[in-house]
Amino acid sequence: MKITIPENIADITLEQFQKYSELINREEVSDDKKAKRKIQIFCGLKPNEIELMAKKDYDEVNSMIDLALEKEANFINTFTLDGVAFGFIPNFDKITLAEYSDLQKYGAETETLHNLMAILFRPITDKNKRGEYIIEDYRGTERYAEVMKQTPLNIVNGALFFFINLSLELVSFTQRYTVQGRAKANKRVTTS
């Protein structure tokens, strides 16, 4: 029997990760059943096929999946899925109220990551020689949310990493601005 084992997170889809995440959060499922189901999710094997595996191979496949899930991801602003080029929102200064509201609505919860991805990445409608691009106008998540379930997990993790860094920078900027504002206010009070 020949199986395909994910070697890194680029080989894992968001949908597979969502199924796996749901599985590992189920306390009533034994660790043994979780390990078998993990192979089903990531390798596409049926339960009876897993039962026929050599114990050594079974353990090795589980370890390889764990290693793939642990790989780090860099931010990637464009990718192709089913022949369609998708691009990350190119300018957050021009984000629409609808995009912002839906980003707040879905957040980074695992079960809604496909919706989040449908906000952040949309088909590229135009691209110039410098690599700058324009994406399709935002019309809600309905059109691309299901498609985004097939997004490689490295793209998803890279986008989440981008947002974590963005929020950390925003917090840092806000703190510096607040400290500077207080210093100016204190200086005015002292000189008055």
Image (cartoon, grey):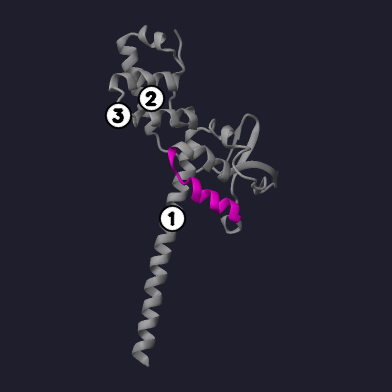
For this view, does 25 lie left or right of residue 99? left
Is residue 50 in sight in this rendering?
yes
Is 101 placed above or below 3 here? below
Type of the residue with mark 1: Ser
- In the rendered structure, find residue 167 and report the number of the disc placed on it: 1
Residue 91 is at least partly visible in this image: no
Prevailing secondary structure of the magenta residues: helix
102 is within the stretch colored magenta: yes
For the image shown, how many numbered marks are present on the structure?
A: 3
Residue at figure coordinates x 62%, y 42% from the top left: 122
Amino acid at circle 2:
Ile
Q: Nearer the viewer, mark 1 or mark 2?
A: 1
Crowding near pointer 3: few (<14 within 10 Å), some, many (20+)?
few
- Asked which secondary structure carries label 1, the reply is helix
Tell whether 80 sits left or right of 52: right
Q: Position of residue 26 (x, y in %)?
A: 33, 29
How many residues crowd mark 1 within 10 Å: few (<14), some (14–19), many (20+)? few
Instruction: Name which residue type carries label 3.
Output: Glu
Find residue 191 and report its image quarter: bottom left
Q: Which mark identifies residue 65?
A: 2
Please name the residue that numbered disc 3 is placed on.
Answer: 27
Q: Is residue 172 above or below residue 147?
A: below
Q: Quadrant of residue 80?
A: top right
In the depicted structure, whether residue 127 falls above or below residue 1: below
Marked residue nearer the N-terminal end (1 or 3)? 3
Q: Earlier in the sequence, mark 1 or mark 2?
A: 2
| Image: magenta residue range | 96-110
